[in-house]
């Protein structure tokens, strides 16, 4: 079956760095997305990776290793507004998005 | 104005009632999606449409139906609502490329008593 695994919850301190991991098992693979979702709101797009390596976008970076079925989202210089859930989603061979349950990130002052 | 709108935003209904959730988008995208989100679970795809004449079942289509009235409008119906359909429902839209991000509506919180 197809599966996305990510930690349920993480806690970090304002100003610090946090890495949110995601492992995926899909029938085929055509890329991996990260979305941010604040409580009670809609998910919003953060990044898309299809090739191995690190993509940097401001304070947020996303890494992909296709051979390991692994991705991570790196958040630097954490701010209180980064408190949210972070959703990992993989595109399978049929170009269907398989979503993880999300990682709730709690930022403490 | 928001690019993707959903109505209603909140709805409480009773078991057995027919419910329609509506979605409109102004992004000019052909692709539209309906998801439900439950606590502790990922987003699950109910139906999707790649253009006005194209409707496809997703992972959990049983108990739901959809209508694509126009490029900009995609409605989700629960023919006979049941309590386990209580969830947060999201509509989304995207461009033609598989790598295109999905833009989500604000969600409809549905409670079936």
Image (cartoon, rainbow, N blue to C red):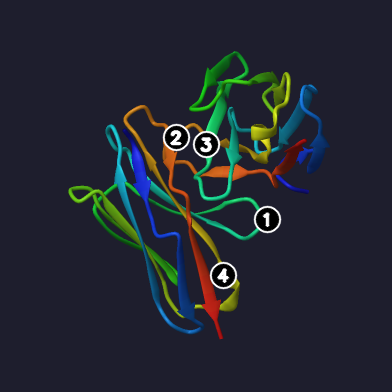
Output the chain of dot 2: B
Q: Is residue B83 left or right of residue A76?
A: right
Q: CA distance from mark 4 to mark 1?
A: 13 Å
Coordinates of residue A14 in the picture (x, y in percent): 51, 83
Q: Are discs 3 and 4 less than 8 Å apart at CB?
A: no
Output the chain of dot 1: A
On-image quarter of the C terminus of chain B: top right
Q: For label 2, count other residues whose C-alpha is less than 10 Å away and answer few (under 14), some (14-19) or many (20+).
A: few
Q: Which residue is mark 3?
A: B44
First reached walking from the N terminus: tag 4 or tag 1? 1
Residue under disc 1 on the same chain as residue under disc 2: no
Q: CA distance from mark 3 to mark 4?
A: 23 Å
Q: Which residue is mark 4?
A: A83
Residue B18, image quadrant? top right
Which label was assigned to residue A40?
1
In front: B12, or A92? Answer: B12
Output the chain of dot 4: A
Q: Are discs 1 and 2 less than 8 Å apart at CB?
A: no
In front: A31, or B82? Answer: B82
Q: For label 3, count other residues whose C-alpha is less than 10 Å away and answer few (under 14), some (14-19) or many (20+).
A: many
Coordinates of residue B3 in the picture (x, y in percent): 70, 44
Q: Is residue A97 visible?
A: yes
Coordinates of residue A64 in the picture (x, y in percent): 28, 55
First reached walking from the N terminus: tag 2 or tag 3? 3
Q: Which residue is mark 2?
A: B97
Q: CA distance from mark 2 to mark 3?
A: 21 Å
Q: CA distance from mark 1 to mark 3?
A: 17 Å
Residue under disc 1 on the same chain as residue under disc 3: no
């Amino acid at each position: 079956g197809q599966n996305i695994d990510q930690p349920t919850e993480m806690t970090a301190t304002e100003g610090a760095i946090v890495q949110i991991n995601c492992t995926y098992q899909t029938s085929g693979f055509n890329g991996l997305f990260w979305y941010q979702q604040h409580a009670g709101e809609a998910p919003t797009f953060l990044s898309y990776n299809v090739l191995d390596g690190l993509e940097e976008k401001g304070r947020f970076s996303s890494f992909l290793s296709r051979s390991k079925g692994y991705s991570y989202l790196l958040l630097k210089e954490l701010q209180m507004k980064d408190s949210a859930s972070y959703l990992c989603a993989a595109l399978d061979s049929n170009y269907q998005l398989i979503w993880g349950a999300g990682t709730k990130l709690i930022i403490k002052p | 104005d928001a690019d993707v709108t959903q109505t209603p935003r909140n709805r409480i209904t009773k078991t057995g009632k027919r419910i329609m959730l509506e979605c409109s988008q102004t992004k000019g995208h052909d692709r539209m999606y309906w998801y439900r989100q439950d606590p502790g679970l990922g987003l699950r795809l109910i139906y999707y449409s790649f253009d006005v004449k194209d409707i496809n079942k997703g992972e959990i289509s049983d108990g739901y139906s959809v209508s694509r009235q126009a490029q900009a409008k995609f409605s989700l119906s629960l023919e006979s609502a049941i309590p386990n359909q209580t969830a947060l429902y999201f509509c989304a839209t995207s461009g033609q490329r598989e790598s295109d991000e999905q833009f989500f509506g604000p969600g409809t919180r549905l409670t079936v008593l």
